[in-house]
Image: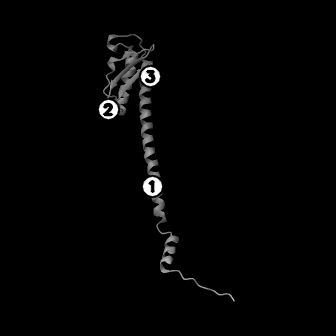
Amino acid sequence: MICKMKIRMSKYAQRYRELAWNEKGAELIELAFIVPFFLVMIIGIVDFGGAWAAHDQIAGAAQSGIRVAVNNFNDTTNPQCGGAPCSVQAAINTSISALNNAGVPTCGMDPTNITATGAAFTWSDSVGCGNGGTFTITVA
């Protein structure tokens, strides 16, 4: 004869078992795990987009300066050109204007005091910024 015994759970054990198998609130916990990763991704996308936009603005300013230098090629050094060929001065003026129009800080650069650097056919101008950095533009 087989004896059947029924084991009765205590009221606390039964309540624990119900809570353990209940899926109420699981979505909230999953959301709490996912939201930080999602926010980091969104902030990264916005930050990368800003860096990409700044890169495009600087590249556009360089292209504008190159166009002016090629179209108005003048290799003579006139006193009004600040000691560099006038085409170099025109390229720097155009590049700085394009950067200022795009909202890129140029630290108040005055392109009239451009000087030749060590390499042949290389002119450079630098100015200190208020944050301790240096803004440099080089035409080679």
What's the residue at 41%, 28% (across, down)?
A: 61
What's the residue at 41%, 32% (across, down)?
A: 57
What's the residue at 57%, 82% (across, down)?
A: 7
Q: Residues within 10 Å of mark 3 (few under 14, many from 20)?
A: many
Task: Determine whether the residue tagged by mark 2 lies in a helix, strand or loop.
Answer: loop
Task: From the top left corner, tell me how far across and down residue 115 is, in percent.
Answer: 37, 15
- Looking at numbered disc 3 in the image, what kind of residue is underneath it? Ile
Task: Determine whether the residue tagged by mark 1 lies in a helix, strand or loop.
Answer: helix
For marks 2 and 3 on the same chain, the one whose residue lies earlier in the sequence: 3
What residue sits right under mark 3 in the picture?
A: 66
Mark drawn on residue 131: 2
Mark drawn on residue 35: 1
Q: Residues within 10 Å of mark 1 (few under 14, many from 20)?
A: few
Q: Say which of marks 3 and 1 sits in front.
A: 1
Q: Say which of marks 2 and 3 sits in front.
A: 2
Q: In 3D space, how far apart are the residues under numbered discs 2 and 3 (Cα atoms)?
A: 29 Å
Q: Residues within 10 Å of mark 2 (few under 14, many from 20)?
A: few
Q: Quadrant of the N terminus?
A: bottom right
Q: Nearer the viewer, residue 119 or 8?
A: 8
Q: Quadrant of the C terminus?
A: top left
For residue 103, which quarter of the picture? Answer: top left
For residue 49, which quarter of the picture? Answer: top left
For marks 1 and 2 on the same chain, the one whose residue lies earlier in the sequence: 1
- Looking at numbered disc 2 in the image, what kind of residue is underneath it? Asn
Image height of 14 relative to 36, above or below: below
Task: From the top left corner, tell me how far across and down residue 63 is, in percent.
Answer: 44, 26
Q: In 3D space, how far apart are the residues under numbered discs 1 and 2 (Cα atoms)?
A: 35 Å
- Looking at numbered disc 1 in the image, what kind of residue is underneath it? Val
